[in-house]
Image: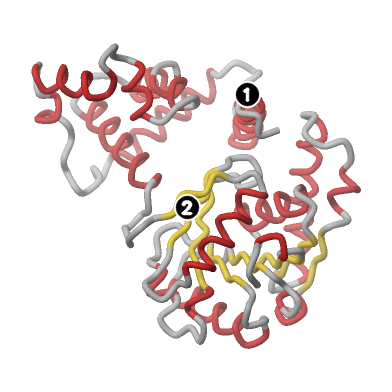
C-alpha cells in the first residue's frame, strides 16, 4: 500500500466506549468496517452502543439516515474474518501490555503484510507493545480523544522501526476521516494531551487542597475562562493574540513580573483523600445542575456531546 486512498476496508478490534466510537467514525466516513468482539454478548453490547451513537447523531442533525451509516458496519467474533482483507486495523482493547502484545500477535498471524495496524493505547509505550511484532514497521499508535467519532484529535506514536511511509499514510487517512492528527517525534509517557490535562488537573487539585477555591469554583473558572478560548485556539496562539507584541511580548511581560511558576504545584503523587473529597463535591454539582445539563453521568455526557457538535460545527468539522 502506498497511499491512504487505497484504504477501503477497516477492522476494529475490541469495542467498549473507544472501539465502538471508532466504528461509528469509520462508517460515518464511508468505510466498510468490521468490528471484532470476543463473544456474541459483547457484540450485542457494541451494537447497542453504536445504535445509540447513530441515533444521537441523527437527532442532532449530523446524519440524515442511520441505515446508510449502519450498513457499512459488520460484526464478528472471528478475528481472522475481521482482519484478513482489512487495509487498516484499529485495535482498542484493554490497556494491558500482555493483552496488547497477544492481540497484536493474533492480528499479525492473519492480516495482510501491507495492512497498517494502529493501537488506541493511551499510556503504554508503542515499543513495548510491538516488542515481539513480526512487522513492527507497519505498527503505529493511534490514540484518540474520547469520543473518537466527535473529537478530532488523534495522537500518532511511532518507534524507531516504524516506516515513515506508514506514518504518512496513516496520517493522511486520519485526515480523510476528519481527524486532526499530531505525530509525536519521540516516545513520551502519556503522550501530549494526557500530560497537558494532567498538569491543569494537578494545579486544580492544589488550589482546592490549599483552600483557594472549591471544586465547583475551580471547574467553573476553567469552563468559563480558559476553556472557552482553548476551544478556539491552542494556548500558544491564545498568548499570541493577548499581547500587541505577540507571544514573545507576553513572555517578556510574565518574566518581568511576579514569578507565578515558582508557586505552581510540583508534587508528583496525587493526594490520597482528594478522590473522596472531589466525588462528594461533584455529586452535589450534579444534583444542582439545570435539567438541560442533566443529573446523571449519561445525561451529562449527552449534554457534553451536544455542545461538542455545536463547537465542531464552528470549526467546520460537521
| Circle number at residue 314 | 1
The quarter of the rendered structure image containing the C terminus is top right
SS of the residue at dot 1? helix
The spot of residue 204 in percent (x, y) is: 29, 30
Q: Quadrant of residue 43?
A: bottom right
The spot of residue 255 in percent (x, y) is: 11, 23
At a point 77% along the width and 37% down the height, the residue shown is 57
At a point 50% along the width and 55% down the height, the residue shown is 143
Residue 11, can we see it? yes
The spot of residue 87 in percent (x, y) is: 69, 70
Query: Vertical placement of 115 versus 18: above or below?
Result: below
The quarter of the rendered structure image containing the N terminus is bottom right
Label 2 CA crowd tier, 10 Å (few <14, some 14–19, many 20+): many
Dot placed on the residue nearer the N-terminal end, 1 or 2: 2
Q: Is residue 102 left or right of residue 238?
A: right
Q: Is residue 20 left or right of residue 33?
A: left
At a point 62% along the width and 88% down the height, the residue shown is 109
Q: Which residue is mark 2?
A: 155
In front of the other: 26 or 198: 26
The spot of residue 215 in percent (x, y) is: 35, 25
Gap between marks 1 and 2, in whole Å?
A: 22 Å
Amino acid at each position: 500500500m502506498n497511499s491512504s486512498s487505497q484504504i477501503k476496508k477497516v477492522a476494529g478490534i475490541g469495542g467498549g466506549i473507544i472501539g465502538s466510537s471508532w466504528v461509528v467514525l469509520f462508517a460515518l466516513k464511508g468505510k466498510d468496517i468490521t468490528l471484532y468482539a470476543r463473544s456474541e454478548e459483547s457484540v450485542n453490547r457494541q451494537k447497542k452502543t453504536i445504535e445509540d451513537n447513530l441515533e444521537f447523531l441523527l437527532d442532532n442533525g449530523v446524519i440524515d439516515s442511520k441505515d446508510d451509516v449502519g450498513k457499512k458496519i459488520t460484526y464478528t467474533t472471528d478475528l481472522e474474518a475481521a482482519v484478513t482483507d482489512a487495509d487498516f486495523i484499529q485495535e482498542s482493547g484493554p490497556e494491558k501490555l500482555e493483552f496488547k502484545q497477544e492481540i497484536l500477535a493474533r492480528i499479525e498471524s492473519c492480516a495482510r503484510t501491507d495492512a497498517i495496524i494502529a493501537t488506541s493505547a493511551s499510556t503504554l509505550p508503542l515499543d513495548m507493545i510491538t516488542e515481539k511484532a513480526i512487522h513492527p514497521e507497519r505498527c503505529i499508535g493511534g490514540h484518540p480523544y474520547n469520543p473518537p467519532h466527535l473529537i478530532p484529535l488523534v495522537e500518532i506514536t511511532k518507534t524507531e522501526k516504524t516506516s515513515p511511509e506508514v506514518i504518512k499514510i496513516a496520517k493522511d487517512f486520519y485526515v480523510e476521516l476528519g481527524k486532526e492528527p499530531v505525530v509525536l517525534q519521540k516516545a513520551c509517557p502519556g503522550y501530549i494531551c494526557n500530560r497537558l490535562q494532567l498538569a491543569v488537573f494537578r494545579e486544580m487539585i492544589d488550589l482546592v487542597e490549599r483552600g483557594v477555591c472549591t471544586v465547583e469554583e475551580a471547574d467553573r473558572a476553567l469552563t468559563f475562562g480558559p476553556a472557552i478560548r482553548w476551544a478556539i485556539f491552542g494556548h500558544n496562539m491564545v498568548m499570541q493574540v493577548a499581547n500587541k507584541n505577540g507571544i514573545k511580548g507576553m513572555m517578556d511581560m510574565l518574566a518581568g513580573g511576579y514569578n507565578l511558576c515558582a508557586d505552581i504545584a510540583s508534587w508528583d503523587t496525587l493526594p490520597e483523600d482528594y478522590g473522596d473529597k472531589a466525588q462528594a463535591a461533584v455529586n452535589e454539582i450534579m444534583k444542582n445542575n439545570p435539567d438541560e445539563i442533566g443529573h446523571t453521568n449519561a445525561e451529562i455526557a449527552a449534554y457534553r456531546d451536544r455542545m461538542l457538535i455545536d463547537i465542531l460545527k464552528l470549526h467546520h468539522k460537521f
